[in-house]
Amino acid sequence: MSARPIDEPHRAASQLELLFDLTFVVAVAAVTAQFAHDIAGGHAMDGLAPFFQVFFAIWWAWMNFTWFASAYDTDDIAYRLLTMVQMAGVLVLAAGVPAANDADYRAVTLGYLLMRIGLIAQWVRAGIEDPAGRRTAMRYAAGLATLQVGWLLRLLLAETGALPSPAQVPAFVALALLELAVPRWAERTRPTTWHPHHIAERYGLFTIILLGESVLAVSRGVEGALETAKVSGPFLIVAGSGLVLLFALWWLYFLAPAGEGLSNRRHRSYLWGYGHYGIFAALAAVGAGIEVAVERTGHDLTASPLAVSYAVAIPLAAFITLLWLVHAPIVPEPVVHPVAALGCATIALLLPLAAPLIGVTAVVALLAAVCVLLIAIMIASERQRSEEITLELSQG
């Protein structure tokens, strides 16, 4: 196992990476469905902490594997088998999502442990077989192993009552921050040779997975609405607006190709990579919100129109804002102009206030229209920029 070159031509996601991602489809579907259930039952605030905690475990495990694979993907027998161990851990974690909503994190912690065993073994192997990157690899292995002990200790203390409920979330935040610090600490000795275009592609693929889960969430909402055997006008409007909204979010994300920016500004990759936790969580939450909005057209739900509207609007505004903030450090000229991004995010947050008067259906349709407007502004701006460049070249 030796480090792959940074400038390897035509580097793309492997078939094993695509198979690995399929297990995360299950995990993301489980956490999205659970959060949608909380929103529909009027317990969205109670479901936020479990949602963010479980989604962090999903995102961080995927991210650790992705950056490791970008530097050390040998695709031999040992590498494949250790990847399968991590895949098994993802499935165990997904099975524990419903229990985590009731503060039972045993299955989630077990799944996370399995994923960590596979990844730690990969780093140890890299340290043994790649002398140049040995210190970095062993630092990774030591950091991950130490923190895994911390996660197990947190679970043990919580199960025995030694860690009271009010202290469990702060303990999670502390351990999560330490997890985020491991890569910075490990790579101080010698940075790994991750491939910028490969990383950009992998993040794009995970974005598509999340959008696909949102489509699945919408279909669950459609199924729930159709149980009443009525296809109403509001049902068609919300379902259609949800599809337009998801397509618009895909369009906005891929307006800014990140590969070149990561290649030119590798030192800013942490801001970009870590910032995607918010982007990915927002996409998953949008899907949950749309699912509830669609289901509401055919069922009477406990959640109020205001709550359902904000379940879509808040993560949408977060996605738009974070998309600009996360790409700003690596892109010389932001594709999404800050004024346009913040303006649309503000409008999205204000629209639900009209839900008691105009209804959830109209709010969701207007939120989709806001995203379409933002895309139109970006296309017009890009066209104007191209025309100015053409004019300068012709005059020169």
Image (spheres, grey):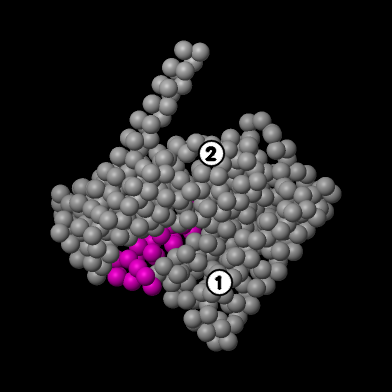
Sort mark 1 into few (<14), some (14-19) or many (20+) by Cα contacts within 10 Å: some
Spot the residue most to the right: 131
> Against 229, is 149 above or below?
below
> Against 70, is 48 above or below?
below
User: Residue 143 placed where, x, y %?
Assistant: 71, 64
Dominant SS in magenta: helix
Spot the residue most to the bottom: 161
Q: Which mark is residue 172?
A: 1
Q: Which quadrant of the figure has residue 148?
A: bottom right
- Between disc 1 and disc 2, the foreground one is 2
* Residue named by callout 2: 331
Q: Which residue is rendered at x = 38% and y = 56% of the image?
A: 315
Q: Is residue 115 visible?
A: no
**Label 1: which secondary element:** helix
Q: Amino acid at mark 2?
A: Val
Q: Which residue is rendered at x = 32% and y = 60% of the image?
A: 311
Sort mark 2 into few (<14), some (14-19) or many (20+) by Cα contacts within 10 Å: some
> Against 337, is 181 above or below?
below
Q: Amino acid at mark 1?
A: Phe
Please report the bounds of the magenta region as a residue range. 25-46
Spot the residue most to the front: 395
Q: Which quadrant of the figure has residue 265?
A: top right
Q: Is residue 177 visible?
A: yes
Q: Which quadrant of the figure has residue 113?
A: bottom right
Q: Which residue is rendered at x = 44% and y = 76% of the image?
A: 102
In the image, is 98 to the left or to the right of 86? left
**How many tags in the picture?**
2
User: Residue 348 placed where, x, y %?
Assistant: 30, 52
Q: Are marks 1 and 2 in contact (CB under 8 Å)?
A: no
**Label 2: which secondary element:** loop
